[in-house]
Amino acid sequence: MKHIRTVNKANLKQTAIKGGCGKCQASCQSACKTSCTVANQKCEKDK
Amino acid sequence: MVHKFKLNGLNIVLDSNSGGVHAVDDLIYDLLDNVEPPFDAECPQRVLEKLSKSYDEADIKECYNEIVELYNEKILFSEDDYEKYAKLKVASPIKAMCLNIAHDCNLRCEYCFAKTGDFGGGRKLMTFETGKKAIDFLLERSGDRQNLELDFFGGEPLMNFDVVKQIVEYARKREKEYGKNFRFTITTNGILLTDDKIDFINKEMSNVVLSIDGRKEVNDRMRKRCDGTGSYDQIIKNFKKLVSLRDKDKDWYVRGTYTKYNLDFAEDVMSLYNEGFDQISVEPVMADPKEPYAITEGDLPRIFKEYETLSKKMQELRDQGKFCNFFHFMIDLDQGPCAVKRLRGCGCGNDYVAVTPDGDIFPCHQFVGIDKFKMGNLDEGTFNNDIKEYFSQAHIYNKPECKKCWAKFYCSGGCNANNYNYAGDIHNAYKLSCQIQKKRLECAIMLKVIKMLEE
């Protein structure tokens, strides 16, 4: 494409099907005790 | 849902529902204001007429085709079809706990949400007996969850460190019986850190949150001792020591709060960096708008500018081959949390609870002391599943403003406690916080786009 560069490789949709295993950290347990951010957490499913 | 923004000379397009992030030229950027599904085989005449004043017609047609191609690949204008997952997996096991080991504190931070440490319920330290019950509660209710998280919190947890050590020892023993893995965090103001405590923390805690606000004058204005003197000189040396002795594979953050008094908080992040800390979280204060230090709507333009300044500083460090991780600019566009996780945020009241020194259970540390949200008591062996059910339903599709927001899969509905405290209900978006969150996300995505384009 000449006009668009897609920078990510993954699609969130694919994560929904096998998601929800709950191995990941609760987001509030990291360094945010007041302003919830979830997208900066890691997926730990295969660890 | 498509969100586009210009930042740092880039045109960025986010397809919220797929997580697709695209760097585009001006023509695509403008064309996206004029087209949406269903798409025709060719660019509609009305669009050509409108944009041909500024752009070449052949280019417009070419861009239209590129947009349609991404649409067909389901990474632009993709459907939001996640609501079915919000209705599944409701009765979650409990896997995380904030253990308020001390409802007391040796600092008198002006902005303290915990009312100087006692949460309004009197100064108390948790006993080992209550701590054991908390561990047992978590083990018994954790179902198939293997990783259990426990944050020693307060007040100031170092004021009750002997009990912290006893609880860690007890949990380490019991985790084997259950085939679980405890991951401990401690959040401390650093005043009582000694070599022995540092050794223990660095051995046992998988994460450490070190509270400090940045520049000395900024820190000491808010984070004061009981006699009114500042805490900076003591904590900075303690934190440096802890970090220097910590294994590289273990997490830690210095974490600060910014207020109306330091809207130039990028300077505080840089001050922490220049003191040798490269894992940094600095967040806005959450406070009653009547407080003089509270952030208010009028501060937002200044705050937005500051996040842009901070993102440029982070980019400069990267360009120089240096490392600095600002917590709220962390984002993984490829291997971040799954869509199911993103529907409910922190999971408070559902898979995450807080326990007080009296053994009272609340949805999280921010709800402690609000009677209507008391979920039970460890001594009495009570637990109110209705409250758990209520929080389990607090997903983005039950939050009207979140449902239509482009950032919903990044903040996941925000902090329920802030929503309740400042917007009246856990389902209502606390707009001040939302606006700051969205700006941070734009900066985070922009930094990621620059990195990926370089690669």
Image (cartoon, rainbow, N blue to C red):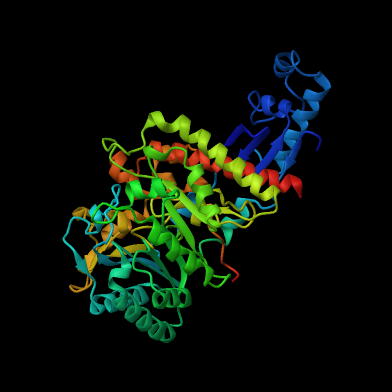
Q: Is residue B177 visible?
A: yes
Identify which residue, A20 or B253, lies in the foreground.
B253
Residue drawn where x is 45% and y is 79% of the image: B180
Q: The N terminus of chain A appears in which quarter of the rendering?
A: top right
Identify which residue, B7 or B344, lies in the foreground.
B7
Percent position of residue B418, x then y: 34, 46
Q: The C terminus of chain A appears in which quarter of the rendering?
A: bottom right
Identify which residue, B330 or B267, lies in the foreground.
B267
Residue drawn where x is 48% and y is 60% of the image: B253
Q: Residue furthest left?
A: B122
Q: Is residue B17 visible?
A: no
Percent position of residue B235, x then y: 40, 61
Quarter of the image for residue B61 reads: top right
Query: Left or right: where does residue B235 sit relative to residue B243?
Result: left
Residue drawn where x is 24% and y is 63% of the image: B103
Q: How many marks?
A: 0
Query: Left or right: where does residue A17 sit relative to residue B359?
Result: right
Percent position of residue B404, x then y: 47, 37
Query: Left or right: where does residue B172 sit relative to residue B292?
Result: right
Residue B137, placed above or below residue B178: above
Query: Left or right: where does residue B241 sit relative to residue B119?
Result: right
Identify which residue, B170 or A39, lies in the foreground.
B170
Quarter of the image for residue B377 reads: bottom left
Percent position of residue B334, x then y: 65, 54
Residue drawn where x is 59% and y is 35% of the image: B2
Quarter of the image for residue A44 reads: bottom right
